Image (cartoon, helix red, strand yellow):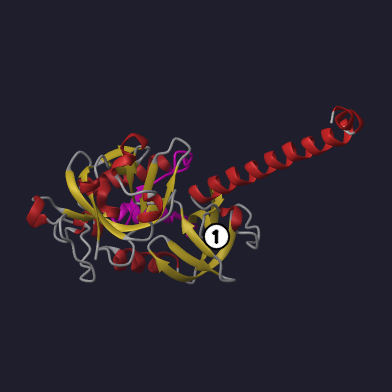
């Protein structure tokens, strides 16, 4: 046996080395797969999207909602600096109609922000039409709220100030006292709730995209989990209505509390309509509720 090892030590060294390298490559691929599975989707997957240079002029051909539209050629543009109501929320029609009035069938200038495209392969742009900043106009008229990523500093001061003034003066659909849209309650008869109801809790039920109006208050937030993922620190994020980073609201489960919940909550709650209960706090410009116990969350049936 000793003679065998002496005669074949070079061959054996090559085999051992190959096994070590192969194992490292395999483990690396697993880790990358885990990161890809747990991280939110990014625009890196949008391989066939043509380049859209900064300040490009394009014709707005169709309005999707209050912050999204199509340009000539069929590409989709998501307006930066704002967030307008989704379908089913109180100000959806008002915001969509206002955006149609401002840009439909008009040439618009598309200014780049910190990111080029989102996970839906939509161009992310500030929009200028007839010399007007469309984000600013929608917020001024109470049709949308200000919404910026941490890196989004362009026009932040003007749009944030416009939102403050619209709130104070109760301007437009978002803030009008007569319309009272900020409750954001979804009149969705398709789902039934057994535990998290106003009758049982004494709490108000609001839509996820209206959560930013209730900082410091305990409420029940209702909406659809658009995406969910587990971070490297084993914190679970449940993003409502839109995937990160355009989500309206987020439910957070820290690693220290996960043993109380179902296994892999990021998969269990994904794409489900849920209600969560708690005090709304602000983190990096977004409203959130920390989930310490499973009794705070319920799936609609």
Answer with left or right where residue 111 lies relative to residue 189: right
Q: Which residue is mark 1?
A: 121
Q: Quadrant of the C terminus?
A: bottom left
Task: Report the number of numbered marks.
Answer: 1
Residue occupying the point 48% across, 42% down: 154
Give how far across and how far down residue 163 sits, in percent: 30, 47
Give how far across and how far down residue 260 sits, in percent: 28, 42
In this picture, which residue range is highlighted in magenta? 128-155
Give how far across and how far down residue 173 sits, in percent: 24, 60
- Toward which corner of the image does residue 102 lie, by quadrant? bottom left
- Does the magenta portion include 176? no
Vertical relation: 36 (above or below) 48: above
Residue occupying the point 23% across, 41% down: 215
Q: Secondary structure at mark 1?
A: loop
Residue occupying the point 27% across, 63% down: 89
Vertical relation: 59 (above or below) 296: below
Residue occupying the point 57% across, 70% down: 72
Foreground residue among 250 and 135: 250
- Toward which corner of the image does residue 165 lie, by quadrant? top left
Answer with left or right where residue 95 lies relative to residue 54: left
């Amino acid at each position: 046996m000793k003679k065998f090892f002496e005669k074949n030590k070079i061959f054996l060294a090559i085999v051992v080395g190959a096994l070590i390298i192969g194992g490292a490559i395999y483990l690396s691929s697993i880790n990358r797969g885990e990161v890809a599975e747990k991280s939110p989707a990014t625009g890196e997957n949008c391989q066939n999207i043509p380049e859209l240079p900064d300040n490009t002029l394009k014709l707005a051909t169709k309005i999707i909602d209050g912050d999204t539209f199509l340009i000539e050629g069929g590409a989709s543009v998501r307006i930066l600096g704002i967030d307008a109501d989704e379908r089913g929320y109180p100000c959806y029609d008002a915001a969509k109609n206002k955006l149609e009035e401002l840009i439909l069938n008009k040439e618009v200038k598309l200014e780049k922000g910190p990111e080029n495209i989102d996970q839906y392969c939509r161009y992310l742009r500030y929009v200028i039409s007839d010399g007007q900043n469309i984000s600013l106009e929608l917020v001024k008229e109470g049709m949308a709220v200000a919404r910026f990523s941490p890196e989004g500093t362009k026009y932040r001061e003007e749009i944030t100030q416009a939102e403050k003034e619209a709130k104070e003066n109760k301007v437009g659909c978002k803030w009008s006292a007569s319309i009272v849209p900020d409750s954001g309650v979804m009149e969705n008869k398709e789902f039934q709730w057994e535990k998290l109801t106003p009758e049982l809790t004494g709490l108000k039920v609001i839509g996820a995209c209206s959560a930013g109006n209730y900082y410091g208050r305990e409420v029940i937030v209702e909406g659809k989990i658009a995406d969910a993922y587990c971070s490297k620190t084993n914190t679970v994020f449940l993003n409502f209505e839109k995937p990160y980073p355009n989500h309206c609201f987020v439910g957070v489960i820290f690693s220290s509390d996960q043993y109380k919940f179902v296994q892999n909550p990021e998969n269990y709650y994904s794409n489900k309509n849920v209600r969560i209960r708690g005090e709304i706090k602000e983190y990096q410009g977004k409203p959130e509720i920390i989930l310490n116990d499973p009794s705070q969350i319920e799936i609609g049936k």
